[in-house]
Amino acid sequence: MKITDIRTAVVEANYDWTFTRVYTDEEITGLGESFLAPGLTGIIEDLKPLLVGEDPRNVDKLWSKMRWAASGAGSMGGVVYNAISGIEAALWDVVGKHYGAPIHRLLGGKYRDRVRIYADCHAGEALEALNSVMLARRPRWLPENAEEQTVIASEINHPVHGRAYGDASDDEVFTPEMYASRAREVVERGFTALKFDLDVPNPYTRDTHSGTLTHAEVRFMASLVEAVREAVGDTIDIAFDCHWRYNVSDAQRLAYELEPYGLMWLEDPVPPENIEAMRRVTQSTKTPISSGENYYMRYGFRESLENGALDIIAPDLQKTGGLLEGRKIADMADAHYVAVAPHCIASPVGTIASAHVAAAVPNFLALEWHGMSVPFWEDMVTGLDGPVIQDGHVRVPEAPGLGVELNEEVAREYAREGEPFFGE
Ligand code: MG
């Protein structure tokens, strides 16, 4: 069996869903998804000559071959790994189809039939649709009349995940009532785990660049958390994300103030580069601290795990190095009795690929779903006998490989202009 071609397509959703298809000489193709990045499809195209002519069943060897080839561009991480992750996942789809086995069986078999989803919730009115450098944009699929009731994110025109919320142009307002009401809505849809952003515009912010928090800011943030906890009660798990914004002492103060609300986790309270700083926050509080969407491969997680810097890790399987690498990271975390809650902003393709890994590792906590605002999220794949997400869970497919195919009609409708569509 030989790889004959590799092609890509990009769908413009809330993020750029970047798909890779691997073609073989046996009429089997495999589909994978990568986390968005500038120039991503060009990188995948550059990697293609390394793989054409190779046996796709040697997934780990091919992964190493791509890794060594990328050593100049980034041996420890970077966007080449986003590309490698999508290709690797597509290889597993090929291998699964070839042997008639679902991907989770190739990764060791499953601990669970259903993978618990945590829903990423946005309490505000503004649409979150971001390009590859996190600039907000107005997607083509937003209804024309949405402008009246929706703050169009493209008018904000600053990086949404940069440190500086609260620019003069950012007039979005968040209240505890909005958080409570969104939380109730999402629980009614069947989810048992929710995540909200906590670093939203705050009426008491004095300086958006310093990484500091005033007492009033911390109290306002605690009021958002309290509102969600009161709205959902004690049987729903809630997590909050800070997107790497704060200094160590203010992150510690925030985590302490949130202790009464029993969070599933507080995510990225400090920037991800300094493991010792993260460890100081984690060790100071009963609030579980999570991070990991910025780390690549098991090497990127080693130091945090060995030093007790994180309570929960959140590798992104469309970015960190792929599905088998996800299994290896989870196993390393398991040796430290640390749970894994994979980060995921993917279409159903990447989400289901992540669910295969989540099913196959013991120490799984919950898998992210970031597609609530995308009207065609569920329509992007075919091959299941019901919705991808039901009652807050993904049923792990039993069909060979990934278990779903891309719905090309829908993908083509929302395809990103200027990008190839599987070679067309
Ligand atoms: Mg996050």
Image (spheres, rainbow, N blue to C red):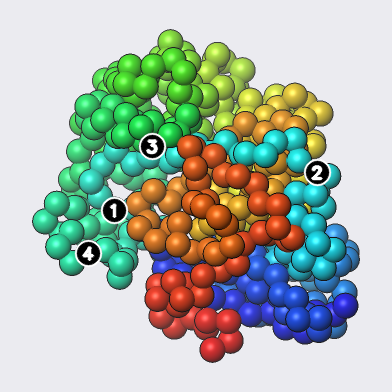
Mark identifier at residue 189: 3
Question: Does any portion of residue 89 appear in the rendered image?
Answer: yes
Camera-nearest label, 3 or 1: 3
Q: Please give the name of the residue rendered at 79% of the width and 37% of the height, measured from the top-left corner.
A: 331
**Gap in angstroms between the C-alphas marked 1 and 4:** 12 Å
Which badge, 3 or 2, is on the more N-terminal residue?
Answer: 2
Of residue 159 and residue 393, the one placed in the foreground of this image is 393
Q: Please give the name of the residue rendered at 52% of the width and 81% of the height, measured from the top-left corner.
A: 421
- Does residue 132 appear to the left or right of 165 in the view shown? right
Camera-nearest label, 4 or 2: 2
Q: Residues within 10 Å of mark 4 (few under 14, many from 20)?
A: few
Of residue 44 and residue 413, the one placed in the foreground of this image is 413
Considering every residue shown, the one lying at the far top of the view is: 260
Which of the 4 image quarters holds residue 330? top right
Which badge, 3 or 1, is on the more N-terminal residue?
Answer: 1
Task: Provide the secondary structure element on which disc 4 rests.
Answer: loop
Which residue is denoted by mark 2 in the rendering? 109
**Gap in angstroms between the C-alphas marked 3 and 2:** 29 Å
Which of the 4 image quarters holds residue 81? bottom right
Which badge, 1 or 4, is on the more N-terminal residue?
Answer: 1
Amino acid at the residue labelled 3: Arg
Which residue is denoted by mark 4 in the rendering? 143
